[in-house]
Amino acid sequence: HVPETWSPGSMGRSARGRFPGTLKRSTPRERMTPCKYGADCRRTNPRHLQKFFHPPKEVKHLLFNPADSARWKTAMVKLSLPFSNLREVEDAIGEYQQLEEKQSFNTLQYVLDELFSSEERLHFFQEVFPGIVELAKELPTRLSNPVPILRAGNCGRHTFDQATLASLLANMFLCTFQRQDFGLGRDCVLIGRFDFLRLLSSPDFLRGANANKLRCFLDYFKTIVARKKSGDKLSNEVWFERRSAPDIKWDELSATFADVNFSMRAEGTIEDADLTGTAWQADFANAYIGGGVLGRGCVQEEIRFAISPELCVSKLLMERMRDDEAILIGGSERFCNYKGYASGFTFDGGHADESAVEGGCRLTTVTCFDAMHFGPGLGSQIKQFHPSAIRRELTKALAAFQPTAEMERKPRSEWPAVVTGNWGCGAFGGVVELKFVIQLMAAAATGRAIVYMALDTRLAERLQDLHSALVDRGATIAETLQDLRTLFQLQHSKGELLDMTQFFRDCAANAETLERGGEEHAVVGRSAQREGNRLAGDGGKEGDGNVCSRAAAACLRTLASAWLARPKAKNKMGAAGDAGSEEAAMGFSASDPSVELYVPV
């Protein structure tokens, strides 16, 4: 609960000091010194927040028109001057942006000094940077009306042309937008940081990867400025859509894994899997869209956004995703090639995007969905199999894979495939096999084809074997969910992870054994039931029918006992299970005369 009336410390401890005015203070409000920056202060130092009073800032839910801001106009005047070195750029931005003490654009300086040649450095100050400023100045004419932020729970779509996106990105690069520290009052807006300050200035240990990310953005601006000078109107459209998962009863789904058009690739990246650009590309997102692309991050999502900078505009438009939401971005263009990953990420030249264009919009679609974060250790891995965790991930994947309204008007054979991979299995600590099964289940529920990029030959073989076991099992999505519940209980009782491929193969073998045993014992059970019905119908002695019914139940308990006592093969990660553990996992004992057992006959 967030109090309706703001007061110092009324919200308790702030989220890492992120929201000024919300940190619990020992000093009364009336005795605090007002901060000279007022509600616009963006400092997060706890000592500063405890010493100075920050009045609550009016919450805005619109991407406002900067033409109405005197601060923005001042920034445009300062940036219109000619610059010959980076120090002059820092001084100009420092005139309107509150820079931290001793903060310098050391990452940009590293790019200019170490990664650029003397010709590229001269071209940046003479052509590229003035072009960025001109792009920023165009924003009032590009956005004549305020654009509403797509808040959590409110689905919608915004569409912009590439020229408007370039103007927005130029303002983000020049840090002309005033940082909106939302979070005061009940109606708070949760959006990530959208300026380039943390990317322009980085710690030494992050300078290599951040410098190459920054070089991707500079290459984008270089390409856009050159296109503008050549007369290109940059009219192709890019759209941003917030969507939520439909209500679905997973326990009643009859789709099977055999219904999924599935293909596995051991090598290659998601963005390179479909050169025509018609397939959907998965973005393993942060709940705050874009993650750390403008900060310290440099993994799958951050790299995808760096090579297609137009995706970064979503950071201005999208509030934090809920558990049942995903974000879809269509029409974005890729501008860069790259090598490596994380700290080894390097810029590898420009990229000519050859994806198809239809109706003034590229057919490239990026579906962004965030996974749950699990810590390291066996306990965290077992927790991922809990039914509530599986249901959350299923709902998230369903939101990401569900077709658009335009697709639903076409036959399913014409729907583009979804290119995905090891979702949430890196820094978030996900179990690869479980996330693989969850994505297959979501694909079966939505009727989508899947292209899975494993990035490793051995992993591809393991996942291919798991897919074969699921298909051979022949179970529906609802039955697979029940299998996963049993797997969670077994793993929780044993305290170890079991091999999922072997588990599903055992499930298939058990189903065959149960079916064969049922044919042998069903005759006895049906005969006993008929005899009971006959005695009850002929007016026999009271209780004769119950005796025969108990005989039938005894036959079924005998069958269940035989199934639980069957020989079991050892799996790769632990010893064979025993009947007692399976009884505990199933929640009954075969020797209990009061239990009602269901056996397919």
Image (cartoon, rainbow, N blue to C red):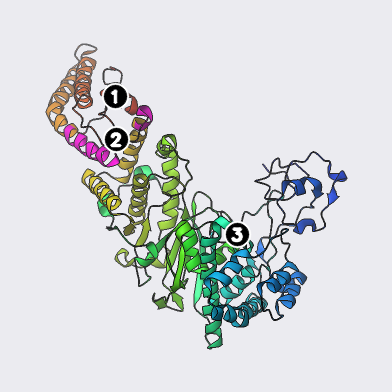
**Amino acid residing under circle 3:** Ser
Q: Of circles 3 and 1, which is in front? A: 3
> Which picture quadrant has residue 337?
bottom left
**Which of the two residues, 161 or 86, is positioned nearer the viewer here?**
86
The residues bearing labels 3 and 2 have C-alpha atoms spaced at a distance of 43 Å
Label 2 residue SS: loop
Crowd class of label 3 (few under 14; some 14 to 19; many from 20; radius 10 Å): many
**Amino acid residing under circle 2:** Met
Question: Which residue is the site of mark 2?
Answer: 573
Crowd class of label 2 (few under 14; some 14 to 19; many from 20; radius 10 Å): few
Q: Residue furthest bottom?
A: 231
Residue range of the region highlighted in magenta in the rendering: 491-513
Whichever of labels 3 and 1 marks the residue nearer the N terminus, that label is 3
Question: Which residue is the site of mark 3?
Answer: 202
**Amino acid residing under circle 1:** Glu
Q: Quadrant of the C terminus?
A: top left
Question: Which residue is the site of mark 1?
Answer: 596
494 in magenta: yes
Whether residue 425 is visible: yes
Q: Quadrant of the N terminus?
A: top right
Marks 3 and 2 in Cβ contact (< 8 Å): no
The relative height of residue 600 versus residue 538 in the rendered view (above or below) is below
**With 97 as the anchor, is 580 left or right in this view?**
left
